[in-house]
Amino acid sequence: MAEGARLRTSSEKLPEEQGQDTGSGSSSGGGGGGVALKKEIGLVSACGIIVGNIIGSGIFVSPKGVLENAGSVGMALIVWIVTGIITAVGALCYAELGVTIPKSGGDYSYVKDIFGGLAGFLRLWIAVLVIYPTNQAVIALTFSNYVLQPLFPTCFAPESGLRLLAAVCLLLLTWINCSSVRWATRVQDVFTAGKLLALGLIIIMGLVQICKGEYFWLEPKNAFENFQEPDIGLIALAFLQGSFAYGGWNFLNYVTEELVNPYKNLPRAIFISIPLVTFVYVFANIAYVTAMSPQELLASNAVAVTFGEKLLGVMAWIMPISVALSTFGGVNGSLFTSSRLFFAGAREGHLPSVLAMIHIKRCTPIPALLFTCLSTLLMLVTSDMYTLINYVGFINYLFYGVTVAGQIVLRWKQPDIPRPIKINLIFPVIYLLFWAFLLVFSLWSEPIVCGIGLAIMLTGVPVYFLGVHWQNKPQCFNNFVDAMTRAGQKLCVVVYPQTDSKDDDVSEETKEQRAPIYKPESEAVDGARA
């Protein structure tokens, strides 16, 4: 999609920029007065991105998906623990890939570099078309629902009001992300801390309940008392629900290039965040059953709110506010990471090249952020977004396994490339066995939904061959792309980021050994960067 468009690099200037000093916006590693993505994400912010993206509204609103399929409190707690362990195993695999292929874009970049352009494009296509716009729209609507709930205590808030407030939330956070990476990460840090404090309050209240002797449903004979007939299919569905609840654990890999010392902070953030989230999920569910029976929990539409009403009395308002704050931070984290995915896709020639440009002073990927915001706003006016999420959830999970399989393939194809982290291959094998079990069960239980999801993904095949693979496009098309690219540059005041010839974290010998991984798929993309 980048063919024919000559990208202006950070060393060139638009006429109106002549005389301006752009060096102030460059990162410390940019050199030469050019602009580049800043390395401003430290360990704390990295943990905030992972924790903030995993913990959305689900643990506050509806953690009952696992319980109703597990059939008992004890089995539900086992599912939460096991899925947390499996998530940690998957995160270890991604940690190795993240430091072996230290590029932003996460699983898209890994799949593309290991399996080729088409596979990578399909991962990007389904993310651009459905996954991130729909997820962000749903989180924003959840935020607006809890903000407006006090204003409409006896009825539902009007649909138009919900969507309008969700749009305001998206626009505000897009402006923050466009203005500064530091601002965006500070927002993420603050709201992640807020949701952890709220969950900490729930856990403390649960411990108080246990000290008072309110642990009937935690006693082994009661915890494993089935309230429905045991069924292997339902247990598998409980594990699937649990795996979805941990979704977002791979989002830090989308911003690898903006991490301070990624070879240390990427694995450290994963090692800190995944156990923390597992602990919070397990103990929050323990706290819930100290105040509610399984039947009450399943009947509640907002578990944390019901919990607060039972135990917090006049302070019960803390829970709906906590859900609103949690979802606000969730929207910010999703905007931040998904825009980097689109940025990485454009840089590889899989999306319009203007999306791979950054502001000359702020060093933020403004076009990618605006594209992310616009696609989410379009989803807000779509009534079928919940249906779309059901269709493509299977595809999202499919690519987790494909990416982890890519780790094994890369070990076989390039065994000698430097790997700052090198885990035992038993870990990807364990993850893939669990992944295959859930994937086969999904296909067996919902073949039509999975089939429609696959069909949506495969619509990207003709788009790939027409937009990316086809090199000799008509000159009029190339001229149009070039004109649109320059218009986008002038509108957003952006340039293509300078590629740093030096890398403080990687030696010249290491970069030479890694060179085969980074070779762009399309020569036209390289020509465009010249």
Image (cartoon, rainbow, N blue to C red):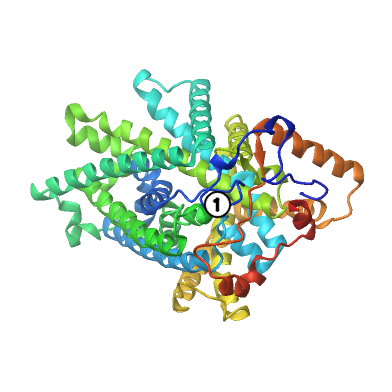
Height in image: 323 above or below 518? above
- Residue 415, quarter of picture: bottom right
* Front-lying residue, 346 or 20: 20
Q: Give the left or right position of residue 444, taking residue 317 as reference.
A: right
Q: What residue type is disc 1 on? A: Gly
Where is residue 49? Give x, y as percent: 42, 49
Q: Does residue 294 appear in the picture of this structure? A: yes
Height in image: 512 above or below 262? below
- Residue 388, quarter of picture: top right
Residue ID at (37%, 18%): 151
Q: Does residue 363 appear in the picture of this structure? A: no
Where is residue 374? Give x, y as percent: 62, 33
Where is residue 236? Give x, y as percent: 44, 62
Height in image: 498 above or below 502? above
- Residue 72, quarter of picture: bottom left
Residue ID at (75%, 46%): 7
- Secondary element at image label 1: helix
Residue ID at (58%, 35%): 373
The local crowd at label 1, few if under 14, some if 14 to 19, many if 20 or more residues have their Cα within 10 Å, is some
* Front-lying residue, 243 or 256: 256
Mark 1 — residue? 393
Q: Of all residues shown, which one is farthest toward the left?
A: 212
Height in image: 331 above or below 214? above
Number of residue marks:
1
Q: Give the left or right position of residue 454, taking residue 23 as reference.
A: right
Where is residue 172? Give x, y as percent: 49, 29
Q: Give the left or right position of residue 509, taking residue 486 as reference.
A: left
* Front-lying residue, 390 or 38: 38
